[in-house]
Amino acid sequence: MVGARQRTLVFCTAYTHDAAGPFYTWDQRYRAWVNAIRSTTLDCDQILIVDDGSASLPDWPDATILCERDDLRTDAPLVIYHFENHLGRHAISDFPGWVRSFFFAPTFAQANGFEKIVHIEADGFLISHRVQQYVNDVRDGWVSFFCPLFMRPESGIQIIAGSSMESYRDFARQPVDALAGMVIETTLPFTHVENSFVGDRYGEYIDYVPIQADWCMQAVPRGNIPLDIFYWWLPQGGSPSTTGAEAVVIERQTVDASAHTGVWYTDFFWHFDKVLKPRSYFEVGTNAGQSLRVFSCDAVCVDPHFVLQPGVLEARKRTFFFQGTSDEFFSGDDLSRVFPQGFDVAFLDGLHHAEVLLRDFINAERHSHERSVIFLHDCLPFNERMAERVRRWDETEDEATRDFWTGDVWKVVTALKKYRPDLKVFYLDCGPAGLVACLNLARQSTTLWDNYAEIVAHFERLDLADFGFQALWAEFPTLDSRKLIEAPSNMRAAFGDPWSPAEVT
């Protein structure tokens, strides 16, 4: 399927009507789609929106609007083509407006010399890097993804390339009403339906997109889920609207000189456990068991010197303790003996030296699965003293914080940013020193280990005073932990709901 790059058109169909609700406006739904396409690694030479006779059109400075009888030839990066009359949808299997718009795309593509068309409806998204790369690699055929909900191909995402471009033109020569009463998913002449990716028409049965999804359809925010949380895959938690999304839950954290403003990290973990119900928990740096005691699932704990408090075992049936350093544990004890399918959640809170946390992350990721979450502790210090490599007290500092010590583990965040762009990483404003959540893990990845020596050498040259607090906080988006725990829908929207009862083994 891989060959020379082809000139590629990405398009969607469109229609706006104020009565449909505020999300179905140009500046929200369709701008979200445009921004999402531009934020991906998808090969795209031009974006086309085919409008089914909307009463009004957007005043976007970056968009060129063409109407019927206009010359179709244009090199504008974003084009809106407007049909004058609205055909709409008459019944569930009679949708002449969509058919006309879909039939128009190959005509536009031929006029502008495109060799490949990627059709993604405006409520559909290519989320993961691997699915984007797959789409880029398609050079021939008429391809769609498999929709588990209806057990048939997904018509909202299609890739047409090579010899199938002529097939598309031939198919589009039919009259618009030829498809009335037809099930479009079983009528389109697909040459291949790909079923190796995670995706579905999620909006038809849940109000969020799971974190493990490679693609999605019917991704329409409903109820009170803020847009920045719903669109968790967009850059910086990205609000999809260029005009200012309302009720944003991801708040850009400014560095507080005294403390983080969110809930305490163990309180957040308690809510995380109760809402998402992970099946397995692994932690490095148990100490007295403050974090362990809030998780109710089976657990594996590593610490060189346990000083456990009463009650840490009450919540679960099985708890395994390994007294020693994390390096000793990973070199001698196989985590997969306890969690053969990988852990669901890991919390890394061991020695506060950057190279040690980096090794812990590398070793832990090898025991993850595609839906695991790794939390890093103490990576968001709020003064330079606590971020020093050697622990010390400053009697002039506030009594509430002078005992805090994060060490230089903040440096690991910079390594993840540079070397692992495939990860999904975000901050949580949890006291006392923040949490870093890492998702989209890849247990087979060797990138960090292959570059370990180079990364550690760079660590030695990094200084927080020079790097800057604002630069550190700008590396990844920050989620408001209070808003996440206020509603289960917010928590699920941020992390997905990856450990459903049906998957428990």
Image: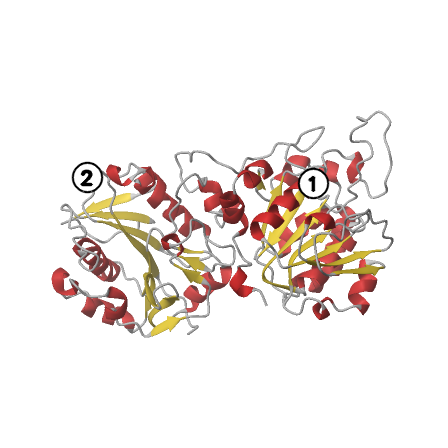
| Residue 408 x, y percent position in the rendering | 77, 45
* Few, some or many residues within 10 Å of mark 2 (<14, 14–19, 20+): few
- Residue placed most toward the observer, 21 or 362: 21
Let me know if residue 475 appears in the view. Answer: no
Secondary structure type for disc 2: loop
Q: Residue 52 at what x, y percent from top left?
A: 20, 49
Where is mark 2, residue-wise? 55
How many C-alpha atoms fall within 10 Å of the one at disc 1: few (<14), some, or many (≥20)? many
- Lower position in the chain sequence, tag 1 or tag 2: 2
In the foreground, 474 or 262: 262
Spatial CA span between label 1 and label 2: 49 Å
- Measured along the vertical axis of the image, is residue 73 above or below residue 503? above
On the image, the x and y values in percent for residue 7 come to 35, 62
Residue 285 in the figure: left or right of residue 174: right
Could you tell me which residue is drawn at 56 percent across and 48 percent down? 275
Quadrant containing the N terminus is bottom left
Q: Nearer the viewer, residue 455 or 55?
A: 55
| Residue topped by disc 1 | 380
Residue occupying the point 20% across, 58% down:
99
How many marks are shown on the rendered structure? 2
Helix or strand or loop: what does disc 1 sit on? loop
Image check: 96 left or right of 495? Answer: left
Q: Amino acid at mark 1?
A: Leu
Determine whether, in the image, residue 178 is placed left or right of residue 34. Answer: left
Identify the amino acid type marked 2. Ala
